[in-house]
Image (cartoon, rainbow, N blue to C red):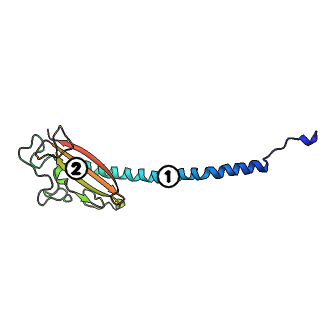
Amino acid sequence: MEFMKKQNGLTLIEIVVAIGILALAMPGVMYYFLNWKSSLSEVRLRSLATQLAQDLMEEIASKKWDENRSQGPTTSPSTIGPDTGESRYTAGLSTSYDDVDDYNGLSESPPQNAQGVSLTTFSGFARSVQVIYVNSTDLDTSVTGPTNNKRIQVTVTWNGGSDSVQLVNVFSNR
């Protein structure tokens, strides 16, 4: 029975079937890996935008609650926005932003640090700030001030404004 010896290896039919299966599977596998790479890029951009929003929110939080008083109820109406002659970039001077609502209307592209230096690494990003008075019972609706609550919203956009991240915080004066 020498003609029945066991042979090692693959037949031509088995090789052709294996190549056919691989040829059918490869487009799906490649599609998955290409999409994974683009979604990873989107996660990276969203993470950078979130960090830019947090950095600006921390800068705002380091300021007084109000021009008129730093604690306790506001005794007179406070105008939302920077006072006449105030600028964000005059650190330590009497004309620099000194309370949280001075940041209302701030818009910068590319973002800048607290000293006014452009963050050129983030040239595709833009930041803006909105500050409004709100009541403690409704933190999303603007009311005529003054109240003891200011809602600060920092928005960071990229891809020409088609993508954005918003960070919202309410500062209370108690």
Place of residue 23 in the rendered image (x, y in percent of width and height, measured from the top left): 65, 53
- Residue under circle 1? 35
Residue at the right extreme of this rendering: 1
Q: Is residue 166 visible?
A: yes
Residue nearest the observer in this picture, 41 or 120 = 41
Q: Nearer the viewer, mark 1 or mark 2?
A: 1
Q: Amino acid at mark 1?
A: Asn
- Residue under circle 2? 60
16 sits left or right of 106 in the view:
right
Badge 2 crowding class, 10 Å Cα cut-off, few under 14, some 14 to 19, many 20 or more, is many
Q: Residue at x 52, y 54 (%)?
A: 34
65 sits left or right of 43 in the view:
left
34 sits left or right of 14 in the view:
left
Q: Which mark, residue 49? A: none
* Mark 1 / mark 2, whichever is N-terminal: 1
Q: Amino acid at mark 2?
A: Ile
